[in-house]
């Protein structure tokens, strides 16, 4: 069989790094092909070359047996290649049809487009109302908009980058059903994900990159997730180990917390209440857009609530700002790395000062101790295996996964009484994710209280002592994480907070 896309010897170098080094592999018609690798392995550069965002320095591609060298994404789309990016490119104030129009070269009349969106979305099991405002859609529905926008182009190769990071287990099943239908119709799919069990369930073949080179290939369903992870990182990975400690006294207590969102499309928090004890990890799951950012902002002190209370070590800190809360031991790491957790044009040393100046003594009498700040930045880099030439490098120069490791390490090494973190392993590879999860467990084992907000349910079940679900700004009562099934969790994420419905469904299964 002639490959749909044949990649031969693609090489792309940037100053100081070879992103792709003589990479070759092929994708067959109708094949779901995984592209795997740790952060910095070269996956993003590879798909950018396929999609016309980056030009290779050497090598060539053939598409359906013909030379293929797209100069820009429009040329790739014209050749039948479409891409669903990890980060949505949608305007919240516009409706679904208007957003789809923006991604089309020659859009039809709006009435015709709306009808076509409804038809295609229904055909592929991704129902969408063309007239709904995107700002009112859930994260899963927003992803449907991106997928439908691609499907309207009738693609023969669909590239998907971390497509399940914002989906509930039920939505993942719907997506997989759609992808299998596309595959059966002959559409090739290039699938990028760090969730290896998903790769095993969905993909027909996999190519593994390490430091820009192809280091192996496999049929995912014939190997274990651990074997694929070992191929990616070049070593075996061990599951996080939990210290045998009992939960201590309550450190963080939140009661009747209500918060009006800062933006029109934000989610209000409604009567949030919970307690996190010393030595405990409380996991909070939820589909993106259900109040995660607002909850972290309320706990970190970025946004002050007029109703409800936040207490740390029995002290009411509800009206204290971020610096005062950090000084008392409440550290936090938001989901958005660039622009929120880190200033992109500042060096890693300067970014260390931004949050650690008080707890690590990096400033005295209004003057910054730059030597101490650089030493602290080097400590973070070494302790969390941040791949960077040094602390003088700007934050934006790091890959997403390496910046994530730096941000998490910067907070953990401040010896927090309480750590609140949103999406701790978002966008990082299997090895880095395992290291971060182990660091979270070690921090709890040392007596800190840890609150982890994440959309990765496997992660939460692996590290959490108790689990709660966030849905439309409301938090369920925390449950013992041991013994919870994905079915029960899925219902909790959908709003079945009293768990009665989940228990009935589970009992009848």
Image (cartoon, rainbow, N blue to C red):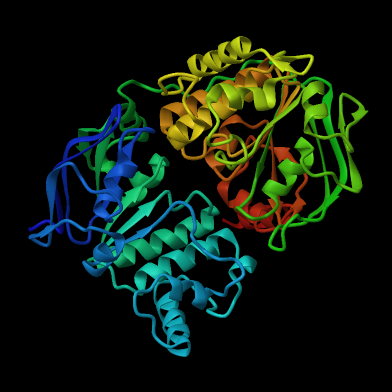
Q: Residue at x 55, y 31 (%)?
A: 346
In the picture shown, does residue 245 fall above or below 295?
Answer: above
Measuring from the top left, give residue 100's x and y in whole percent.
Answer: 45, 73
The quarter of the rendered structure image containing the N terminus is: bottom left
- Seen in the picture, residue 486 relative to 173 is either above or below; the reply is above
Q: Does residue 323 appear to the left or right of 118 in the view shown? A: right
- Percent of width and height locating residue 44: 34, 44
Q: Residue at position x 53%, y 26% from top? A: 347
Q: Can residue 213 be seen?
A: yes
**Spot occupied by residue 189 in the image (x, y as percentages of width and height):** 28, 57
Q: Quadrant of residue 447?
A: top right
- Quadrant into which the C terminus falls: bottom right
Q: Residue at x 51, y 28 (%)?
A: 405
Image coordinates for residue 429, horizontal then vertical, percent = 42, 33
Nearer the observer, 325 or 428: 325
Q: Is residue 425 left or right of residue 223?
A: right
Q: Is residue 177 left or right of residue 271?
A: left
Q: Quadrant of residue 379?
A: top right
The number of numbered badges drawn on the structure is: 0
Residue 362 placement, left or right of 22 = right
| Residue 428 visible in image | no
Task: From the viewer's side, name the closer residue of 26 and 176.
Answer: 26
């Amino acid at each position: 069989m002639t490959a749909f896309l044949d990649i031969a010897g693609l090489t792309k170098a940037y100053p100081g790094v070879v992103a792709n080094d003589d990479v070759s592999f092929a994708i067959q018609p109708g094949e779901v092909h995984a592209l795997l690798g740790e952060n910095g392995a070269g996956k993003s550069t590879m798909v950018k070359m396929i999609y016309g965002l980056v030009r290779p320095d050497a090598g060539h591609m053939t598409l359906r047996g013909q030379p293929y060298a797209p100069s820009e994404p429009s040329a790739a789309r014209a050749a039948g290649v479409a891409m669903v990016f990890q980060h949505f490119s949608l305007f919240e104030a516009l409706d679904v049809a208007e957003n789809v129009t923006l991604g089309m070269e020659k859009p039809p009349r709006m009435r015709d487009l709306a009808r076509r969106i409804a038809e295609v979305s229904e055909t592929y099991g991704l129902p969408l109302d063309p007239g709904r405002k995107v700002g009112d859609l859930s994260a899963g529905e927003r992803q449907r908009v991106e997928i439908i926008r691609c499907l309207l182009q009738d693609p023969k190769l669909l590239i998907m980058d971390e497509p399940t990071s914002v989906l509930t287990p039920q939505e993942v099943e719907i997506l997989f059903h759609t992808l299998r239908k596309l595959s059966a119709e002959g559409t090739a799919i290039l699938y990028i994900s760090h969730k290896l069990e998903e790769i095993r369930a969905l993909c027909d073949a996999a190519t593994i990159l390490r430091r820009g080179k192809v280091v192996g290939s496999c049929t995912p369903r014939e190997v274990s997730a651990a074997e694929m992870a070992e191929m990616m990182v070049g070593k075996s990975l061990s599951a996080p180990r939990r210290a045998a400690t009992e939960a201590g006294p309550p450190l963080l207590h939140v009661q009747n917390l209500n918060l009006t969102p800062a933006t029109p499309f934000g989610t209000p928090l409604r009567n949030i209440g919970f307690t996190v004890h010393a030595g405990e990890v409380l996991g909070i799951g939820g589909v993106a857009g259900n109040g995660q950012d607002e909850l972290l902002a309320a706990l970190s002190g970025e946004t002050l609530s007029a109703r409800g209370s936040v207490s740390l070590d029995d002290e009411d800190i509800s009206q204290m700002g971020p610096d005062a809360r950090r000084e008392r031991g409440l550290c936090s790491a938001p989901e958005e790395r660039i622009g929120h957790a880190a200033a992109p044009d500042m060096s890693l040393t300067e970014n260390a000062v931004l949050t650690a100046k008080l707890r690590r003594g990096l400033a005295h009498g209004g003057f910054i101790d730059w030597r101490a700040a650089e030493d602290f930045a080097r400590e973070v880099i070494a302790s969390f295996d941040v791949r960077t030439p040094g602390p003088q490098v700007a934050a934006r120069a790091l890959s997403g996964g390496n910046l994530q490791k730096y941000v998490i390490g910067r907070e953990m090494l401040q010896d927090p009484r309480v750590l609140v973190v949103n999406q701790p392993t978002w966008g990082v590879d299997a090895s880095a994710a395992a290291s971060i999860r182990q660091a979270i467990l070690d921090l709890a084992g040392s007596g800190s209280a840890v609150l982890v907000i994440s959309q990765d349910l496997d992660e939460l079940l692996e590290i959490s002592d108790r689990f709660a679900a966030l849905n439309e700004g409301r938090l369920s009562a925390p449950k013992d994480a041991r013994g919870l099934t994905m079915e029960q969790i899925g219902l909790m994420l959908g709003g079945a907070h009293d768990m009665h419905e989940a228990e009935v469904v589970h009992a009848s299964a």
